[in-house]
Image (tube, coloured by chain):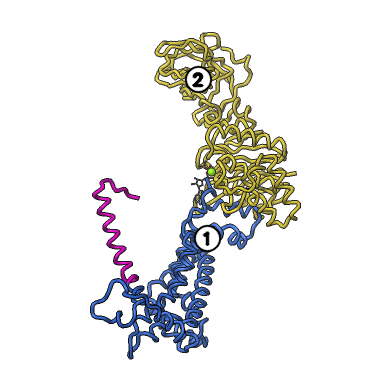
Amino acid sequence: MADLQLKKVFKRYGKVETIHGVDLDIRHGEFIVFVGPSGCGKSTLLRMIAGLEEVSEGDVFIGGKDVTTTQPSKRGIAMVFQSYALYPHMSVKENMSFGLEVTGESKDVIEERVAEAARILKLEPLLDRKPRQLSGGQRQRVAIGRTIVRKPEVFLFDEPLSNLDAELRVQMRIEISRLHEQLGNTMIYVTHDQVEAMTMADRIVVLRDGNIEQVGTPMELYHSPCNQFVAGFIGSPKMNFLPVSVTSVVGQTVSVRLPDSQEITLNVEHGELAVGDSMTLGIRPEHFLHGESADITLQIKGDVIERLGGTTYVYGELDGQTLIIEADGEKDIVRGELMDFSFHLNRCHLFDKDGIACKQLAVEAAAA
Amino acid sequence: MFELRSWQARLGFGCLLLLIAFFLFFPVYWALISAFKGNSELYQLNPTLFPGEIHFGHFITALTEGNLLLQLKNSLLTSTSSALLNAALASLAGYSFAKFEYPGKKSLMLLILSAQMFPFGVLLISIYPMLQTADLLDTKLGLTISYIVFALPVSTYMMYSYFKQLPNELIEAAKVDGASNFRIFYRIVLPISFPAFITVTLYAFMWSWNDLLYSMTLITSETNRTVGPGLLLQYINENNADWGGAMAASFIAASPVILVFALLQKQFIGGVTSGAVK
Ligand SMILES: Nc1ncnc2c1ncn2[C@@H]1O[C@H](COP(=O)(O)OP(=O)(O)OP(=O)(O)O)[C@@H](O)[C@H]1O
Ligand SMILES: [Mg+2]
C-alpha cells in the first residue's frame, strides 16, 4: 500500500524559504494534482517527494516508511519530467530497460516488462528508434513507459504535457487517466493548468507561495472554495468578483450592497464583521441566467461578445466592474445593448476583506 | 551566421578567403614539392613551382636511414596515451565541477585554470626536478605525464562547459532509475558528450605530437626519442641542413595526425543531444 504523507515539510535555500511547512495525506491509489501559479513550489514539493531535492525540515512517508533521507531509487517512485529527459543515445527499448538493468533484473523480466509497457502505450513499432526520431507525443509516451516498467508504488509527473500542442495534450490527458485506472497506483501530477487539474484529479491540492491553500475533490473546490484565490483559480473562465459593502449584520444574516446599489442578504458563517466593511461577492460566469428568472437581476451592457458556438461569452460592465457571463449560444445577444442577467443567491460566494470565504448556511434561510 | 547581401560583398569575401587559404597552404605545398625534388633542383638559385621530375629518394632515405620508424612509434605511444588519459581525467574533473556541489569547488576550479596562466616553458622548470625525483627522466611515461600536466586544465574546462549545458533532468532521471553516480557518468553523460571527449582528445594529441621543447629536454636517449626532436636532430643540425630529407620525413611524420583527424572529424559535429529534452 503506497499511501503518502508529508509532515510539516519545509524547503529553504539558504535564508530563502520556499515551502512553509506543508502537511498532506495521500491515500493509496489516489490521483492527486498539485496546481498553482508559476513559482508556488509545485515542482519543489514533488521533487522532495522524489528525493531529488533535500527536505530542509519535516518528514516524508511513503507506504508508512519514513523516506525523508532515502535515495530516490529506493522510494518506490518513478518520475516523468517536463522535458521527458529521455537518454538521447539509447533506443526506445534501451531507454525503458535501463532502470531494470541497473537494478539487476534478469533479461527475461526486462523483455517481458518492456513488451508489456510497449503494448499498453502502443510503442511496439517504435522500440528501435532513437528519441530524436520521435514526435513529442511519442517521446512523452516513452517517458511514461520508462516509469511503468519499474512498477513503482507512486508515479510522479511534473507538467508532463506542457510541451505538447493543445490537441495532443487533451489526448495524452485521457491516456494518463486511463493508465491510472488500469494500474491503480498512486499518482501525483503537477500542472498549472486548472483544466488538467479538474479533469484528472481525484483530489486537487491548490498551492500558493509555498503553502497549501485548499485540498479537495474538483467539485468541492468548485462549489466551496475556501478563499478568493482558490475561487479565482478553479473554473474557467474565472469567477467574477464584485466589490460590495456591508449594510447590516444581524447574527449570521449579512446584507451587502452591490455596485449598482442593489442589496442582497445572505446567511453566512463569518468572522468579525461591521456595517460599512468592504467584502467581495463572487459569481461564476456560468451561473448567470439570461433574463430575470433568478433571485437577483443585473442590467449589463455587453462590450465584447465572443461566440464559441454552443456558448457565448459576454464581457460587460456593471458600474465600472468588468463581468464575464457565459450565455447560451442560441440566445440572441447584441453588442452594446443593455441586457438582463440574473443569478440565484445560493450560487454566490461571499469573501471577507482578507479573501476568506464566508460559507453560506442554509439556502432557505437566505431569502431576504 | 551573417549574410552577405550583394554580389560585390560575396566576391570580396571569397577573395579574402582565397588569400587566407593561400597563406595557409602555400608552405605546405612548398614542403611537399621540396620533398619530391632532387637535390640539384632543390638547391638551384631560381626555385621551381613544380618539380621538374618526381624524385622519391628523400622518402627512401628518411625511412631507411636514421630511426624514423622507432621515433614514430614512440610519438604515437606517448601522444595517444597522454591524449586518452588526459581526456579521461578531464571528463571526470569537468563532470564533478559541472554537476556536483561541494565546498571549495570554485577555488579549486580557479586553481586548475590558473595553471594555464604559466607558459609551458615555465612549467617545465618545475616538472623537470619532479620527474628527476620520481626517476622518470628519459622515459616515455615521464613524457606522457608532463604532456597531461600541460593539457589537463584547458581540457577540464572544455569538458566542464560541455557538461554544464547538459540538462539536469537527464541525470535526475537516471538517478530515479537507480543508477549510481559512476554509472550515470559512463552510461549516460559520457556517451552524450562524445563530441567534446573527442575534441579534448585531439587537442591533447596534437599538442603532444607537435611538442619539441618537452621531448627535447626530458628525453635524452635515442631509444626513447620522439619524432619532433628526431627530425630536428637528424636533418637540421650544426653540420648540415638536408631540406629534402626533412620535408619527406615530416610528411611521413604528419600522416598519422592527418589520418586521426580524417577519422574523427565527423565526431566534432555535435547534435547528439538532440531529442533528449523537448
Ligand atoms: N535553487 C534554488 N534556489 C533558490 N530558490 C529556488 C531554487 N529553486 C527554486 N527556487 C524557488 O522556489 C520557488 C518554487 O519553485 P518551483 O520550481 O517549485 O515552482 P513551480 O510551482 O514548479 O513553478 P512552475 O509552474 O513555474 O514550474 C520559486 O519561487 C523559485 O524561485
Ligand atoms: Mg515547476
Q: Chain of mark 1?
A: B
Residue B194 disc label: 1
Chain B colour is: blue
Q: Which mark is residue B11?
A: none
Q: Which residue is mark 2?
A: A308
**Left or right: A62 in relation to B103:** right
Determine the CA span between mark 2 and mark 1: 52 Å
Color used for chain A?
yellow
User: Which quarter shows the C terminus of chain A?
Assistant: top right
Q: Amino acid at mark 1?
A: Phe
The residue nearer to you, when weighing B138 against A281, is B138
The part of the image, by quadrant, that contains residue A144 is: top right
Inspect the magenta stretch and tell me whether residue B16 lies in it.
Answer: yes
The x, y position of residue B214, in whole percent, is 42, 81
Instruction: Give how far across and how far down residue A46 sits, in percent.
Output: 60, 45
Residue interval drawn in magenta: B1-29
Give the vertical position of B68 relative to A315 (above or below).
below
Q: Is residue B234 above or below residue A156?
A: below
